[in-house]
Every structure is written in C-alpha cells, then in structure tokens.
Amino acid sequence: MLLQKLTAYADHVAETLPAEFYREKQIHWILDIAEDGADAELRDRRVPAKSRDQALIQPVPYVQRSGTKVPPYLLVDTAEFVLGLPKTADKTAGPSEKETTEAERRNAAYRELVLRWAEGQAGDARADAVRRFFASDALAGLKQDLPDIDAKDTVALMVGTQFLHEEPSAKKLWALVARERKGGEVGLCLVCGEYGALLATIPEPVKKGAIPSAGGTNEGQLVSINTSAQGRNGVMQLANTPICDRCGARAMAGLNHLLSRPGHHHRMPGEGVMVWWTRENTEDTLEALLFGGEPDPAAISHAISVLHKAPDPVAGQLVSPDDFHSLTLGLNNARVVVREWLDLPVEQLQANLGAWYEDHGVHNGWTGETQYVPLWQLTLCMGRASGDRYVKDTAPHGMQTALVHSALHRAPLPAWVLPRLLLRIHADARVDAPRIALLRLILNRSAYPEDHLMPTLDPDQPDVPYLCGRAFAVLEAIQRAALPKLNTTLRDKHFRTAATAPGTTLTHLRFDAMAHLKRLRRDNQGAGVALENRLTEIFQGIDHLPVHLTPRQQARFVIGYEHQRADDLAARRARKAEKDARKASDEPTTA
C-alpha cells in the first residue's frame, strides 16, 4: 500500500522529478573537454560552506552502490573514478599501493562506461570529442598537474557549453545500466500488479541527512533484506518482496522529492521526519494548521466547521473528496524505520485537526478571544521555564511525535505526559497559555466525563478540585488587592502544595485572607465585599476539602484556577470599557 501511494504520487509530479535513476548532487569540478578531444581543463566550482546557495547542484546519474568493487556512474562521478585520483588514508605517507590500484580499477571501469555511451552516438560531435579524449593519453597529461582536488569531489563532464549527463542519450543509457545492475528475475510486481523485470535491490536510498537521527546521517533503504535472518525462509534481497524496476525507482524518487519539498515534510530532531501528500496532489493545509509558526485563523475556522458537519457556504466550497497520506520515518543505521503510516480522506483530516484546536483552545479573558497554541509551543512548554521563555532541548524526547499522533488520529496523549507536565508546572510555578492548552487537551481526551470541562469559567461546575483551583485564584486576588506592591504572591509560595494537598493549604490561606479582607473593607470596601462574597460562594460548594489530589484532579485544579483568573480579567476589561464609555459621553463636544 505504501509503495503504491508513493508511486502514484511520483506519477502526479513526474514533470518535476529528476530523470529516472538521477538524483540532485553538488558538482565540485567540471572537466571541460575541448571540442576536438585533444585536451581538457578542470574548472573549480566549489563554494565556501557559508555560500551553499551558490553551489552548482544538478540531477546526475545515481544508484546506491556498496562493497569494495563498486561500479562507476555514467559521466558524473568522484575524482577517483573520473581522474583515477586515489584516496589517501595517510595524508603524510601518501596513497598506498592498494589505494592506487583501486583508483586505477575504478578509472578504467569509468572510462569503459563513458566510451560505451560515446560509441553509441554516431555522428555526435560531443560524443566524438569524449571518445577521443578517453581513448588517448590526454587524461594522463592532465593528471601531471592536478589542482587541490579531493578524491571524493564530484566531477562532471562538459563539452562546449553542454553538460553531457543532460543529454537524452545519456539518460536513456543510464536507466538501462541501472536496471542491469539492480535487476533480478521477471515476475509479478506487488506494487503495480503487472509482469516485468523485478529488482534484486532498491536502486535509490533515502538521501543522506533527510531523516534526522541521533546515530548519524547515513543513507537509508526503505526495503532492505541483506542477511538470511531477515528474509522469509532465509531468502535475501527482494525475492519475497517482488517490485518491478519502474515502481522501485518511482517510489523512492517520490519519497525523496517529498523529503526535499517545502510544505510537505516536517523534521523532528532526534525523533524522525514526517512527509505528507494528497492523492490528487492538491494543496493541503497541514503546514498552516499544525507545523507553521502561528496557526492560520481562517484554516482553523474551516477545520472546526468541518468537524461539526455544518460548514458555512464559503467553508463548504473548500471540502475536498481527496485523500491524505502521511508517513513518519526514523533511521536505524542504514535502514529506514516506518514508524507510522496514515491514509484517510482530507475531510476527515480537517475534522481531526478541528477537534485538536477545539480541545485545546484557551479563552483569553483580557481580549475575550480564544487563543490557539501552535504545536511547537505545546512541545516546548513540557520543558523547563526560565523567565518568560522555555529552555531549549529540555522537553522530553518523543513529545512532538506524541502531539502529532494525537492531532492526526484524534487520539489521547500518552499517560506519561500529564505527570511530566504537572511536574514542570509545580517546579517552575508557571501557568501560561501553552500549558493550560496542553492540560485542556489531556482532559478533553480523557475517558472520564468529569475531566471534560468547559473552555471558560463554569460557575455551576460542582467538581471539588475545580472549585479548589477557583478558590486559590480568589485568595490570590484578595492578596493582590490588599498588597499591590508585594513581590512574592501566593502562587509563588503555595501553588504546588495547594494543587496537591488543598485540604491543609487552602484552610490556612483562607484564615490568612481574613486580615487582607479586613484591610480591603477599610481601603476599598467595594472590592473587599465582592471578593469575600465570591470566596464564600465557592467554598459553599465544597463539602469537604480533599487531603490529596490525583494527577487528573490536579489538572482540574489548575484549569479551575486559570478559569477564575480569566473571568476576573474579563470582568476588569468590562469595567474599564464601561468607564471609558462613560468618560467619553461626559466630555463636551466641540463645534
């Protein structure tokens, strides 16, 4: 199924893909052969590391090669193949006899392949020039005065102003050579269901560095069976996984295209990479909704309307019958690990993402709007806070992957997330929008009905932990009103103990609040009476203060605390707006 979808995607974007068995690679040197083939010039196209955008990068012949007697690529290869320049393990002593012999072997194989192409192009002046150059001793003369060139540098051939690997004849021959090297028997392909030449091994691996990995950045094979222990009945290579040469090449070309295409892949350092596409190759909104810097409000509104199956006329026109596919990959040495494969209608994806935002949206009491937190902030907030920021790389490993899985599958987060989040909230004494959003997401996707709280303050909610959080917020407001210049608040000193053991903590804090209320009744009677009534009303709903709260109850405590604070901010905003309006109406008008 996976290879079928990748092959279908490659067919849709065939015009943007490199030629068959070609891959983009940086060219470091150009071997510019004279039009008469008598000599050639090496031109340096290397660029400094800081100027990678100026590098010469082109699709060139490529298939994976391994072992000691590796074969050459056509026309474009390393200096060891093109020039016969040996690798040098010991820079001081120079190349060994073994290294020199191997370089000569590789150069001879390269020349043989180049001449095979040139001799097949009768009447082509450029091919004639190449044939004369490699059939003569011109290369030996060139090697006597080589510039500072490394054996691993990539060298491309050019005659006049034309790169030879761009010739249609070169692309045709290279496809034939690649099939000869990677081909197996003739049989039924499991991908396309047709009889044809089957591959012995997949010709193109995943590009080096395309999949982030803590263990290195090797190339990786999507299908790899090279030991008898891995294959069924001890059979190696692709004998038990028949894939024709076209499907194998197309699937890997499509995957590498996705891994390099902006807006169709997302790297999760240390966790892997996710790629996605749609069946009809239409533009999707996953980047805007999940991986962008800030969520697109219009895209969120559309996703939520799809969720409720009641889209407005504009949103209804955007509903697509297309299918969405995503693939999450990791890397284990040189083998690609498929960690997750998702295949669902685009409309269902949008509904899942609508549920994702509806489940974690946070009401902002001061602005009166719902704040939607991007995925990267939900990941960071699991880490350690320092001032008004989160310390980089302190979030637990696997957090971003867990969030992506929850968003795409409309699934609950792993059980370990809530205790880790509460630990950070208590350790940092910090409750902000991202952490409240993550708590709401955890509770809304809980199997327990008591965890499903409203997005804003619910004055009729009888849940005791929720009421305890509200009470703590009012006690903090009483302290702040009575002592506005106090540097250390109740949250700084008592939030952790109140959220874990409210029985003792809230009893003491309520007793201490009596002195603050007495002072407020003297200095600001209106505020004092209002806060005292609010505190009394909340405590009337609590039959018995719990001695200890479970992690889920602690989460409801924090949500209750935040809801009460947001409601207080909304009330303060309303009073300010009313005061400003009254002041504006009292001002005299000028003619």
Image (tube, grey):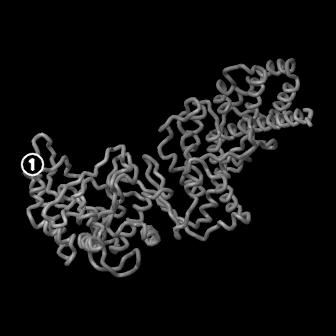
Q: Quadrant of the N terminus?
A: bottom left
Is the residue 146 above or below the residue 59 in the image? above
Give the residue drawn at x 69%, y 32%.
547
- Of the residues shown, which amino acid type is indicated by label 1? Ser
Q: Quadrant of the C terminus?
A: top right
Q: Which residue, given by chain and number where applicable, does mark 1 sit on?
A: 96
Residue 541 in picture, x, y percent from top left: 81, 37
Residue 418 in picture, x, y percent from top left: 59, 42
Give the residue drawn at x 67%, y 20%.
487
**For residue 344, which quarter of the picture?**
bottom right
Q: Is residue 124 left or right of residue 24?
A: left
Name the element at disc 1.
loop
Q: Which of 78 and 545 lies nearest the eye of the viewer?
A: 78
Q: Is residue 56 left or right of residue 581?
A: left
Q: Which of 496 and 279 lies nearest the eye of the viewer?
A: 279
Give the residue drawn at x 88%, y 26%.
526
Q: Is residue 269 left or right of residue 78?
A: right
Residue lying at the far bottom in this picture: please name it.
Answer: 195
Q: Which of 37 and 400 lies nearest the eye of the viewer?
A: 37
Q: How many marks?
A: 1
**For residue 94, which quarter of the picture?**
top left
Q: Is residue 265 left or right of residue 528?
A: left
Is residue 447 shown to the viewer in this render? no
The crowding category of the residue bearing disc 1, from other C-alpha atoms within 10 Å (few below 14, some 14 to 19, many at least 20), is: some
Residue 437 in picture, x, y percent from top left: 64, 44
Residue 162 in picture, x, y percent from top left: 28, 65
Is residue 488 shown to the viewer in this render? yes
